Amino acid sequence: MSAYDVDLFVIGGGSGGVRAARIAAGYGARVMLAEEYRMGGTCVIRGCVPKKLLVYASRFGDEFEDAAGFGWTVPPARFDWATLIRNKDAEIARLENVYRWNLATAGVEIVDSRAVVEDAHTVQVVKSGARVRARYILVATGAYPTLEPPIPGGELGITSNEVFQLERFPERILVIGAGYIAVEFAGIFCGLGSEVTLLHRGDRLLRGFDEDIRTGLGEAYARRGIDLKLNRTLEKLERASDGIAATLSDGSVLAVDQVLVATGRRPNTKALGLETAGIEVDRAAAIPVDGYSQTLAPSIYAVGDVTNRANLTPVAIREGHAFADTVFGNRPTMVEHSLIPTAVFSTPEIGVIGLSEATARLRGEVTIYKTSFRAMKATLSGRDERVFMKLIVDAASDKVLGVHMIGEGAGEIIQAVGIAVTMGATKADFDRTVAVHPTASEELVTMRTPFVVKHPQAVG
């Protein structure tokens, strides 16, 4: 008789945990998965998926305006927030049921409860008090949004969790932050008709992205009417007769209906009992793991945002799959975190893979190719929005080190380009690829003249 009730106990029913559970079960493992909220995790329930649905909704206004240039007469459009949220909720409920069905079909036992670690091989199901002995434990509890830094009246703000369930559409909204979530929701509410103020303590948006992308998005958002308040912070929030009064560090006071705080997320490790297995989280509250997602306790692994490596849903999925391959499939697999294609669903959209120009220059001599142009669609619509593309190429090997884009469909384009870059494509490989005409993406294979070539300063 086995000393364990299951081969694998997964804590967390998000993207990484679900993928790990399904793949492990496919290898014949006995798997139990506990989720305390809703199956699907942040991405499906209150993250990527509902966010993208709201992004789609926010872009119809542009389409209605652009149609006139192509001969269409479109009557004045009217947007209804309640309808959007109701339809979004129905789709999310459908997807949650799909996740549950897929797990059940794979033979995974689902436990609708919080679960905590009691020791290296024991998990307690909080709702029932039951203790489950597991050969391996996988922690996949993700991260949670924070209302930080704390300020007077901070409780009047909401996070990306609550924004999806607002009962009333905010005519005036203050968004705080400059990362994915902040710029995406600023674009969403602007497109839906809100008066949007985007507040950031730094001088540009999207820290860590290529400087041309950061500058380009800021300029595009300013043209769209988003009020960018940079190099400033929020000092306090107060109830006012007409909504919320937000006092900024420069002394100005904004009157808004809603304040969305998108200044960061923290790994969801609080009260998980990790210390009982000898696991100490780091200063960011993340679980330290090795390349195989294994913690200091050999029987306990962790994947996804709870490890604070590359906090993106597809990465969590890959990590979960690699874990199952390693532990149950006899196929030791590491996930490469250095080359990850990503999209920011702002409007205009951003697609990126590889190194920024600044980072690439630290590693050696590079050749830069970039272009900015008006998309073909805009020639008749009259929209004042440009497409930007940039290639960063290693001067010695001709290898493409980075691709950066702003424009319609950037997310779709960067997924395909990501295959080439991941395979180690050179600029010559791009050049000998026949262009698809007329498209915006053909510019990626037709740029021939370097924009600038510089020799980085020697490091002593």
Image (cartoon, grey):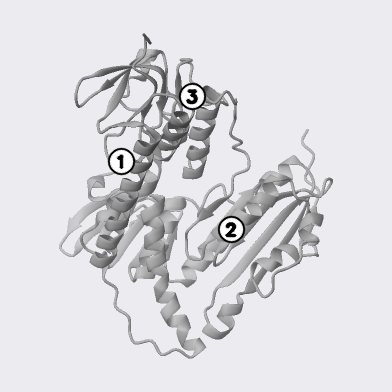
Whether residue 139 appears in this view of the structure is yes
Taking depth in this image into account, of 371 and 211 the one nearest to the observer is: 371
Q: Residue at x 38, y 60 (%)?
A: 53
Name the residue type under label 1.
Pro
- Residue projecting furthest to the left: 241
> Which quadrant of the figure contains the C terminus?
top right
Q: Is residue 235 left or right of residue 136?
A: left
Q: Assign a secondary structure to mark 3.
A: loop
Nearer the N terminus, badge 3 or badge 1? Answer: 1
Question: CA–CA distance between discs 2 and 1?
Answer: 30 Å
Q: Residue at x 79, y 55 (%)?
A: 429
Q: Is residue 17 left or right of residue 93?
A: right
Q: Percent from the top left, x then y, of residue 287? A: 44, 26
The residue beneath circle 1 is 150
Q: Is residue 444 left or right of residue 59?
A: right
Q: Assign a secondary structure to mark 2.
A: helix
Q: Residue at x 60, y 56 (%)?
A: 414
Name the residue type under label 2.
Ile
The residue beneath circle 2 is 213
The residue beneath circle 3 is 288
Q: Percent from the top left, x then y, of residue 216? A: 57, 63
For mark 3, does the 10 Å Cα neighbourhood hold few (<14), some (14 to 19), or many (20 or more) residues? some
